[in-house]
Image (tube, rainbow, N blue to C red):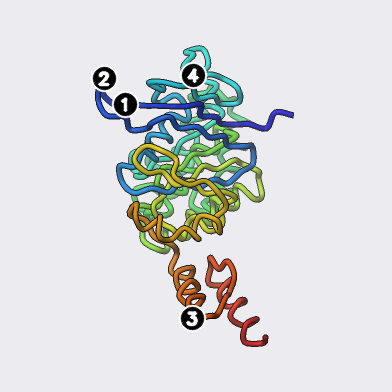
């Protein structure tokens, strides 16, 4: 059974003709139901991947396929965008209505969804991101994290199989970042929505199924969070770091206390306690 949802085949992309390549020969596959995080510093090419994923940009060279559909074929454009929804960094750029539920309804209304089904979709989407109780609130009075969850709900109401989130927490405070991450993880774990989450915050990658590191327009690393964060020296060379907890565990390992692969505070507490008991 074919399980590929998104596939990049040797993709190169340049913003200007004869200009430098923002992506160079990138190939990877995202399978249905995966939670994939893409890490990279500013200008590494990770946001270009987001825009190539559902026909916003088309490859200069190579191919991008969404559920087997070639994004460069104009006939596939709408179906590609129905399959993969993109949430951008600034929610204010995606929120178009003054009331929360009206904003979430905007996308599916443009798909000519019948009114009865539209009501169900809006309510389900708001429940999914924990914003149903705010459905009658004015959007401009919401916090940054709440606005971003509304933006995600607006994409969810269009029933995509995959959501690509392009640095959705970059403009948020720590509370807002936690709210968005919790909502996205719930969508993946409980509703089976495929997630491609683009960020430069290391802590946001620890719960992913898979992490890809992009540098200078190429895939530098691709593996589980534990595999990636073992490469701390290489990550630092490309302007990235490992989560603080993982860095502390590495320092203790150098002192002879091997705590194993520690990525979260809970991992650290459990590993440290086990070490003390031992």
Q: Which numbered disc flags the more N-terminal residue, 1 or 3? A: 1
Picture quadrant of residue 51:
top left
Q: Residues within 10 Å of mark 3 (few under 14, many from 20)?
A: few
Identify the element where label 1 is drawn. Answer: strand
On screen, residue 33 above or below 79: below
Label 1 and label 3: CA atoms lie apart by 47 Å
Residue 132 seen by the camera = no
Q: How crowded is mark 1: few (under 14 residues within 10 Å), some or many (20 or more)?
A: some
What residue is pinned by disc 3?
Answer: 255
What residue is pinned by disc 1?
Answer: 14
Q: Which numbered disc flags the more N-terminal residue, 2 or 4? A: 2
Name the front one of labels 3 and 2. Answer: 3
Label 1 and label 2: CA atoms lie apart by 7 Å
Name the front one of labels 4 and 3. Answer: 3
x%, y% of residue 81?
A: 50, 26
Relative to 89, 125 lies left or right = right
- Determine the residue positioned at 56% across, 59% down: 226
The residue nearer to you, when weighing 132 against 128, is 128
What residue is pinned by disc 4?
Answer: 77
């Amino acid at each position: 059974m074919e399980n590929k949802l998104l596939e990049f085949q040797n993709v190169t992309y340049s913003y200007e003709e004869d200009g430098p390549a923002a992506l160079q020969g990138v190939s990877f596959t995202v399978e249905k139901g995966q939670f994939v995080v893409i890490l990279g510093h500013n200008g590494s090419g990770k946001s270009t991947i987001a825009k190539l994923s559902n026909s916003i940009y088309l490859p200069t060279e190579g191919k991008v396929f969404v559920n087997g559909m070639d994004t460069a074929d104009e006939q596939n454009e709408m179906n590609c965008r129905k399959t993969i929804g993109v949430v951008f960094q600034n929610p204010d750029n995606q929120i178009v209505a003054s009331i929360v539920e009206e904003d979430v309804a905007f996308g599916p209304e443009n798909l000519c969804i019948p009114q009865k089904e539209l009501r169900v979709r809006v309510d389900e989407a708001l429940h999914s991101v924990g914003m149903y109780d705010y459905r009658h609130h004015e959007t401009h009075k919401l916090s940054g994290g709440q606005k971003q969850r509304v933006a995600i709900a607006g994409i969810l109401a269009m029933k995509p199989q995959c959501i690509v989130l392009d640095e959705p927490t970059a403009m948020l405070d720590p509370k807002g970042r936690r709210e968005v991450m919790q909502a996205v993880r719930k969508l993946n774990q409980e509703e089976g929505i495929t997630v491609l989450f683009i960020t430069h915050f290391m802590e946001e990658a620890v719960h992913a199924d898979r992490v890809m590191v992009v540098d200078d327009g190429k895939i530098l690393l691709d593996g589980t969070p534990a595999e990636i964060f073992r490469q701390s020296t290489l990550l630092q060379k490309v302007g990235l770091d490992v989560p603080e907890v993982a860095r502390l565990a590495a320092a203790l390992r150098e002192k002879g206390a091997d705590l194993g692969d520690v990525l979260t505070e809970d991992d650290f507490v459990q590993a440290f306690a086990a070490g003390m008991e031992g």
